[in-house]
Image (spheres, rainbow, N blue to C red):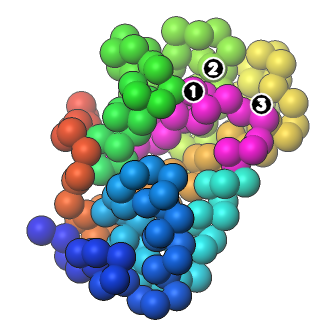
Amino acid sequence: MSRIAVPATIDDAPASSRPLLEDVEQQLGVVPNLFRLVAHSPAALEGYLALIQSLGRGALPAATRERIALAVAEFNGCSYCLSAHTYLGRHRAKLDDAEIAANRRGTSRDPSADAAVRFAVAVLRQRGHVSEDDLAAVRAAEYDDGQVVEIVMHVALNVWTNYLNEVARTEIDFPLVAPSRAA
């Protein structure tokens, strides 16, 4: 059971969050528990949705964004986000099981995506204090400065959702995937 109550329906959310949740429902067909949890703060929900939308228009491919989300969720031991991004990785980004397993280990079978995922994990492990070698490796894979900024922003966004879900103990509404190691 969640430690922070998740509004059961859109109508149970604060009034100013309802139109935002209705947009989520229109886009996804459902409103996952995370979005209803965030709806407690209309400002947080608006910011979260705006950031998702903005990054969706960024330079990183959707599959790379999912790979980063999987690596971050595994690193932080967040079952909710690991479950959600495993589902999204399979169904939206069309990642196969071997690729998802690699992403959870902080790598990728795709050489270009591997550089992005490894850099994302370096950002996590070193809390942003990456080495010159870390930065050189991602640049050697032809990621430009804008893409490096986006990788860091995806790390930050996913850390936020990981932490929020762990604080709240959000009930998982995707097929359950547990972290393979303790965070």
List x then y, in percent, for residue 153: 67, 51
Please say whether residue 168 is one of the residues in the magenta stretch. Answer: no
Q: Which residue is mark 3?
A: 135
> What's the residue type where badge 1 is placed?
Ala
Marked residue nearer the N-terminal end (3 or 2): 2
Secondary structure at numbered mark 2: helix
Residue depicted at 34% across the width and 83% down the height: 11
Q: Badges 3 and 2: C-beta atoms under 8 Å apart?
A: no
Res 105 quadrant in image = top left
Q: Which residue is mark 2?
A: 113
Please say whether residue 74 is one of the residues in the magenta stretch. Answer: yes
User: Which circle marks residue 63 in the picture?
Assistant: 1
Marked residue nearer the N-terminal end (1 or 3): 1
Who is closer to the viewer here, 165 or 107?
Answer: 165
Q: What is the spatial separation of the Cα atoms under label 3 and label 2, in whole angstroms?
A: 15 Å
As drawn, the residue found furthest toward the right would be 145
Q: Which residues are magenta?
A: 55-78
Q: What is the spatial separation of the Cα atoms under label 1 and label 3, in whole angstroms?
A: 21 Å
Res 88 quadrant in image = top left
